[in-house]
Image (cartoon, helix red, strand yellow):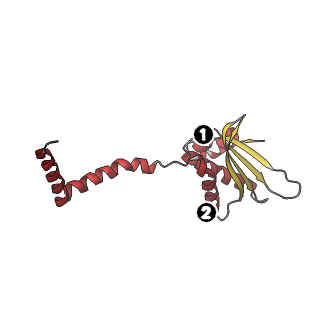
Amino acid sequence: MDVNSADNCSRNFNYIIRKGRPLTRQLKYLFLIFIPFLLSAQIHDRHISSTVEKYFARNRTAPTIISAEVVEDFLYGRTLKIRILGHRNSENEDLGFAFGAAAAVANQAANPFEALWIEMDVRYKATETTVAVAPALCSIEAIVQKSRSFGEWWENCLEIL
């Protein structure tokens, strides 16, 4: 690099700093370029369980969460498994809330899920633990994106074991 080109470079830099406008304009364009990356933030596997727990903690009528974990099931594939303690008077609502939380988190997950698995224990007399499984894509379409009706999801996608 010769002396003249170095001198021109320092003059251009001083012009940008002194005037302020070109640098501000460049920063605005740079910010606009990075907005899509900021909006498409995804949840990584190590944060899935804490995100589900926060989702349950925000709603005071939510069932009690026991655990949330990512498991590799031999039958269903990559699965988000949530265990809850439901209320005996609102079993269907608790199950729906848990699937809503699972679908919302699965929609934002960095690695896609193949199934959502909910285990609900009611702890009332002889009531058994309810285990329900639904494909993640079908659940996201019905619960998050609303491109499928909830009734259709309940009939065609949800499998109570």
Nearer the observer, 150 or 80? 80
Q: Residue furthest left?
A: 4
| Residue at (74, 58) in percent of width and height | 90
Quick one: quadrant of the C terminus?
Answer: top right
Q: Is residue 153 left or right of residue 4?
A: right
Please state which amino acid type lies under the numbered disc 1: Leu
Whole-percent x, y for residue 88 in the image: 79, 59
**Could you tell which of marks 1 and 2 lies nearer the N-terminus?**
2
The reply to whether discs 1 and 2 touch (Cβ–Cβ < 8 Å) is no
Q: Amino acid at mark 2?
A: Arg
Kind of element beneath mark 2: helix
Residue 29 located left or right of residue 130: left
Taking the spot 74% from the left edge, 45% from the top edge, the residue there is 132
Q: Is residue 63 above or below residue 34?
A: below
- Name the image quarter holding residue 111: top right
Q: Position of residue 17 (x, y in %)?
A: 20, 58
* Category of crowding for the residue at label 2, using alpha-carbon neighbours closer than 10 angstroms: few (below 14), some (14–19), many (at least 20): few
Circle 1 sits in a helix, a strand or a loop, which is it?
Answer: helix
Of residues 149 and 58, the one nearer the viewer is: 58
Cα distance in 3D space between marks 1 and 2: 25 Å
Q: Which residue is mark 2?
A: 58
Residue at screen point 72% across, 34% down: 74
**Residue where numbered disc 1 is placed:** 137
- Residue farthest front in this picture: 2
Looking at the figure, which quarter contains the N terminus? top left
